Image (cartoon, rainbow, N blue to C red):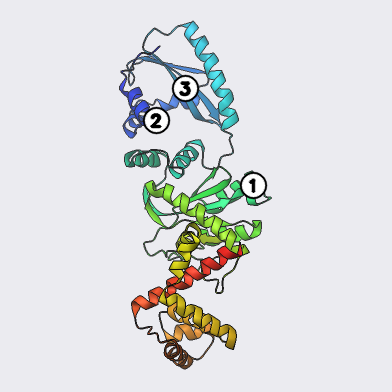
Amino acid sequence: MDVPCDDPITVALVDHGYHTEENIAKFKLHKRFKPWAEESGFVINDTHEICKYVTVVKTFKTKSSFSIIIVMMCNVVEIDDYLLDVYDMFASRVEYFAKRDYPDDKPSGNAVDTFLKDLFLGAPMNAQAVKERSKYLGIPNEARFCLFYIKETESEVPRSRLLSDVSRLVAPAKTVLVDDAVVVLCFNCRSDRCALHCASNTCPLGHESLASRLNDMMARFGLACGRSSKFTELAAASVAYRQAQVACGISRKRQIGHGKLGIHHNWDKIASFDSCSVDYLVETTTDEGVELVCSTYAGYVLDSIYQQDVAMKTDNYRFLYEYLMGERRASVVADKLHMHRNNVKYRIDKIEDQYGIDTNDPILRFDFLLAYRIREASLVQVAQ
């Protein structure tokens, strides 16, 4: 019957799609969860303590706890045996689909799975809804978040084993299966001093990072993994999901095609979107657009340096890159290239004189580094 409901608890549930914190507090105050968790079959509540009508509740328990609750509200007619019989038939049908579609082996639990999938896939949710649902599920609304995307279908490892192994490895981070990918929402970082791309030797707390552990697993299973940029608000998870997904695809391409320097990734099997964002721009830009971007002054100089290297069997192309990445510090560059620090100054002076450039110019340094990145990305694209 198309009868509007005027019960405030139910109206709030319909509006939000879940019970608000205020309603949860009312349930706890009146110990409403106790019979749901302990009793089997129907739970009839005619006390009118919370709801103004008589309610009939049916719970479906998995592993000694309830996971799905169906509520019948008697706001038109009084409760009777025939209503209970019809309700029981309906509940039995729901139970069949519940057990089929919601198995017991989900690492994060059904509620967490649903919430994270809604977040990642961009389901409409305002900031308040995200905050309330995350608090209810024990996920921080604000933290140092990072998202990992692992393409599950690329491995012969059974899906259930991969999901289980990753979940145990990354706890307390949350793991969920989205389509054919295992996705990890990490909020394990506890220090404001955490690096942008954590490694096993950079954790301020002295821990082996989640990324380091995942990298070892990806190598063992022969999988590629994409990593989002760091973000601090849970509502940004949908953008992070897309970043990690893109990075995973680019990572696999870089395993097939190689540039001159291999400058993009610090990890063998994990590609960060921050490190391969230029690859994404090159991949989604027309050939004409890439050609125009490559035809900058810095680009022409790099082409000349590389061609001269090939002809004279020198390595000035790589030296200039390491010099710029080392922020022109002679000792750092010398250690990286296994040379005496005095030779660093000699070589950069020679390159500047030969090609008429001045690396003291910060804008030119930026142009050179960008040109290096674009060329590396372009070479990988051509290799596909």
Judge whether 72 appears above or below 352 on screen.
above
User: What distance separates the C-alpha of mark 2 from that of mark 1?
Assistant: 32 Å
The earlier-in-sequence mark between 3 and 1 is 3
Q: Which residue is labeled 1 in the image?
A: 161
Work out which residue is located at the far right of the displayed protein and give it: 156
Q: Quadrant of the N terminus?
A: top left
The earlier-in-sequence mark between 2 and 3 is 2
Query: At which x and y percent is residue 214?
Result: 56, 58
User: What distance separates the C-alpha of mark 2 from that of mark 3?
Assistant: 14 Å
Query: At which x and y percent is residue 79?
Result: 42, 8
Q: Which residue is labeled 3 in the image?
A: 70
Q: Quadrant of residue 295?
A: bottom left
Work out which residue is located at the far front of the displayed protein and give it: 288
Q: In front: 361, or 170?
A: 361
The earlier-in-sequence mark between 2 and 1 is 2
Residue at image coords 51%, 42%: 108
Q: Which residue is labeled 2 in the image?
A: 17
